[in-house]
Amino acid sequence: MATKGKLEIDRERCKGCLLCVRACPVKVLAADVEPNSWGYYPSKAVAPEKCIACGNCFAVCPDVAISVYKL
């Protein structure tokens, strides 16, 4: 059975580079349609139930805007 996870994205720290979207093996993340206060379109979890807590998104985030937790 795969590990279940939960992730949190700090919308104000995220600059919308979308490296995490490309790094996610199960396609949990996508670009948000609403900008943050800086005008960037941050990443958001579109399928959080699929998260396997692999940590790829955390590892590639240059802004340290993502936290990943194992459930």
Image (cartoon, rainbow, N blue to C red):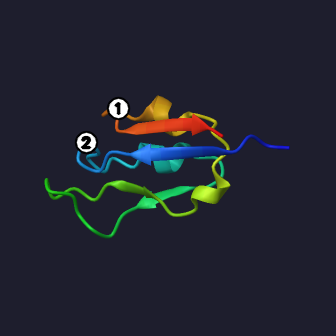
Q: Secondary structure at mark 2?
A: loop
Residue found at the very far right of the displayed protein: 1
On the picture, is 36 further left or further right than 63? left
Expressed as whole percent of the image width and height from the top left, the position of residue 55 reads 57, 34
Residue found at the very far bottom of the displayed protein: 33
Q: Characterize the local packing of mark 2: few (<14), some (14-19) or many (20 or more) Cα atoms within 10 angstroms.
A: some
Task: Decide which of tag 1 and tag 2 comes sooner along the chain.
Answer: 2
Q: Characterize the local packing of mark 1: few (<14), some (14-19) or many (20 or more) Cα atoms within 10 angstroms.
A: some
Q: Which mark is residue 64?
A: 1
On the picture, is 60 further left or further right than 3? left
Q: At label 1, which amino acid type do we have?
A: Val
Q: For the point 47% across and 34% down, which residue is it?
A: 58
Q: Say above or below: 20 vs 38.
A: above
On the picture, is 40 further left or further right than 23? left
The N terminus - image quarter: top right
Q: For the point 64% across and 58% down, which residue is it?
A: 49
Expressed as whole percent of the image width and height from the top left, the position of residue 52 reads 67, 44
Expressed as whole percent of the image width and height from the top left, the position of residue 30 reads 46, 60
Q: Which mark is residue 13?
A: 2
Q: For the point 35% across and 32% down, which residue is it?
A: 64
Expressed as whole percent of the image width and height from the top left, the position of residue 9 reads 39, 46
The C terminus - image quarter: top right
Q: Say above or below: 25 vs 62.
A: below
- Disc 1 and disc 2 in contact, CB within 8 angstroms: yes
Disc 1 from disc 2: Cα separation: 8 Å
Q: Quadrant of residue 47?
A: bottom right
Q: Which mark is residue 24?
A: none
Q: For the point 50% across and 39% down, which residue is it?
A: 57
Q: Nearer the viewer, residue 6 or 52?
A: 6
Q: Secondary structure at mark 1?
A: loop
